[in-house]
Amino acid sequence: MSLRLQLRTRPEVPVEADALAPDRLQGLKTPEVESLPLIHGNENCVVGDFFAADGECNGELHLEGDLSRIKHLGSGMKSGTLHIHGDAGAHLGVGMSGGQVIVDGNAGDWVGPEMSGGRICVKGNAGHMVGAAYRGSPMGMTGGEIIIGGCARNELGHGMRNGLIAVGGDSGDFTGVNMLAGTIIVLGRLGLRPGASMKRGTIVTLHDSELLPTFSYACCFRPPFLGLYLLHLRQLDLAVADAHISGRYARWCGDSIELNRGEILLYKT
Amino acid sequence: MDDKVKTAETSSGHVKVVENATCTFCGCVCDDMVLTVDLDQKKITKAKNACVLGRAWFAEHVHEDNVPPALLDGQPVSVEAAIEEAARILVEARFPITYGLSDTTCEAQREAVAITDMIRGNLDTTTSVCHGPSGLAFQGIGESTMTLGEVKNRADLVIYWGGNPAESHPRHFTRYAVTPKGMFTPNGKKDRYVVLVDVRRTPSAPVADLFLQVKPGHDFELAWALRALVRGRRLDPGIEEATGIPLATLTDLAARMKSCRYGVLFFGMGLTMTRGRHFNSGAVLALATDLNEYTHFVAKPVRGHGNVTGADNVVSWQTGFPFGVNFSRGFPRFNPGEFTTVDTLSRGDADAALIVASDPAANFPKAAIEHLGRIPVISLDAKETATSRLARVAFRTATYGISVAGTVYRMDDVPITLRTAFESKLPSDEDILTALRTRIKALLLARGQAAKSRSAATRTAA
Ligand code: SF4
């Protein structure tokens, strides 16, 4: 039986809910779940102050209500499924290493920062810094997948070291900035200055894009790996057409200020 | 009495001359002012060495004896009553924010940090709306830094990027960076090559030997192109279309930067507050870092308000981070975008605000101002502002550098001591904040004891 937590009191100020991850709630009885700690602004509270719990967690946790003010959901989770039936607040799935997070609505800033494994699927839009490194840290996500159905904002995959980020809509400025490795696929348009300071890694878009002066054109080709990635994304409900799978892509190398081993692939035909 | 302060009876009345006084109007913090103060009228009649902005700053301060030091809901009350109410608001709040701090002394800033730490609030300064992006870039890239004295004595290549010092910091050219004669720049301006990068020709342009008019919003591309050239990478001539500046000019400039003896990049808000923000400042800082492989090169933001640099220094030394710091969990966390004031207000996170020496109600985005109108606000300011008018508790304090002594930091992180011109009956920001901190501490202690005895009672009952 899965555990359902229904938001019954909307918090007045942001709540930090590190406790709400399926693996941490595994096997706990309802009163035990309701007495787990939350932080409401600067006050220590318990889950029961805001949520009504029902059922027992067998690896599946369902959260219902407008959770846009609840931060750090699914933080550090290693396994299980966290299903958010609504919007999620900032720092969703921070540092997670396994399991799956599904958000039916939109997510705030910092989706999956520094995560190392597992998958986050956001059906709506996401904010800034998806899969990014925290300020002052050199490395963003090191593994796993983040799939955003809608659009994402600036600094998508900042400092990303490995893994996959896919965006169904457009991405903001500085997509893949300081990227070390990994793959970013944006089905819509890239914002300004994609791949600035990238060392390695791949950024793909299905549209044309204005690139920095430190990127140079290499060739036009059919990247074999990309077909596999796009098929995978199609299975995850992103709108990928056959032409994208078999199409030709222009390869631009950069950033020449750094190693020049990164690539930006722009869909041609 | 301070030997730099002389009083004299003249035919026109009781006059005092304060030498080596400091102007706190802009980040230059010139400390060579000679103020003539009319003690009878309590006003500054002459400010020798000051620029037009400085003169206006000194002239506009007259002694105000009749203003009430504290207002509660717009009605005059005693300072004690106002402190009591302010302390209650802050202690009861769950997400109190402290903001401002740039136009006051370091001593007052320190008290504000202590208060925010105690109430587990959110601390931010006006840096977040001017050079906050540079603060982020320092953390990401690092800063190759200097003092303005060093620039005066050594710099032979001076680049101003995204700023108009002739109008915003009038003495920056003459006192520090362009015309003064220094140890290794004995001929002043003749020994320096000055470059100005801006989107339009400003009154600063005539000073420059080279003016680069960059396409609006393309500073990042320009810095990136210069970085590539400095590193010896090949660039496409199409760069002129992207940045508005021909490749040959950029190649020349890159060569000049690599071959100068001591180069300095001063950057302003034209860089930090346009699209790209911290990446723009980061690109300029990285350019300076790259150039250090060839010569000595430094980069420094040109800071606006008098003591905004002090705010960065005080907040950094007490919390480890310069702005956008949150204490909700009892320890400092830094996350601009989450804990910066425009965001905490626009998202409606904050439930009380302590605003020190700044006026967010006049210059923040609409959503933020609307939220400010919904929550209890405590304001400290030397003048009436839009923020003090909407504040529940408004303190009127004495002006720093005119009636309040203390420490301020110049834009190059050099601390400078203030000398006062005349006394004021109004309390200083530091006085109010110290009293507030003491009261908050007492309230928190009482609350802690009450909680303890409550839990003891529950235990006995159990
Ligand atoms: S340059 Fe700035 S600090 Fe110096 S006198 Fe003018 S306004 Fe005052």
Image (spheres, rainbow, N blue to C red):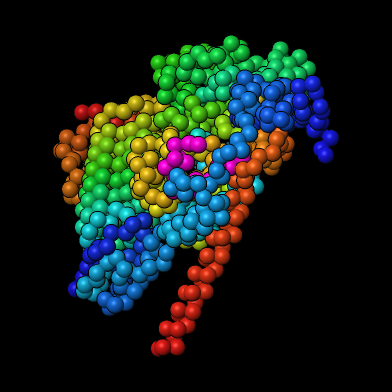
Where residue A267 sits in the image (x, y, percent)? 25, 31
Q: Is residue B240 above or below residue A257?
A: above
Up/down of A22 relative to B231, above or below: below
Reply yes or no: does residue B312 show up in magenta.
no
Asked whether B439 or A158 is in front, the reply is B439
* In the image, residue B51 above or below residue A162: above
| Quadrant location of the N terminus of chain B in the rendered image | top right
Query: Residue B69 lies in what quarter of the image?
Result: top right
Left or right of residue B435, residue B417 in this image: right
Q: Compare residues B147 and B85 and report the one nearer the observer.
A: B85
Where residue B343 appears, as percent x and y from the top left, is 40, 44
Check the image and report above or below for A144 versus B462: above
Residue at the spot x=29%, y=65% of the render?
A50
| B373 left or right, relative to B45 | left
Q: Quadrant of the C terminus of chain B?
A: bottom left
Q: In x, y percent, where is residue A7?
A: 25, 63
Q: Is residue B436 left or right of residue A254?
A: right
Query: Which residue shows up at 44% across the image and 37% down it?
Result: B386
Magenta stretch in the rendered image: B384-398
- Quadrant in the picture for residue B240: top left
**Residue B397 among magenta residues:** yes
Where residue B348 appears, as percent x and y from the top left, is: 35, 48
Q: Quadrant of residue B299?
A: top right
Total number of numbered discs in the rendering: 0
Q: Nearer the viewer, residue B85 or B199?
A: B85
Residue for point 58% across, 38% down: B66
A257 vs A137, nearest the viewer: A137
Could you tell me if residue A116 is visible in this image?
A: no
* Quarter of the rendered image showing ligand 1: top right
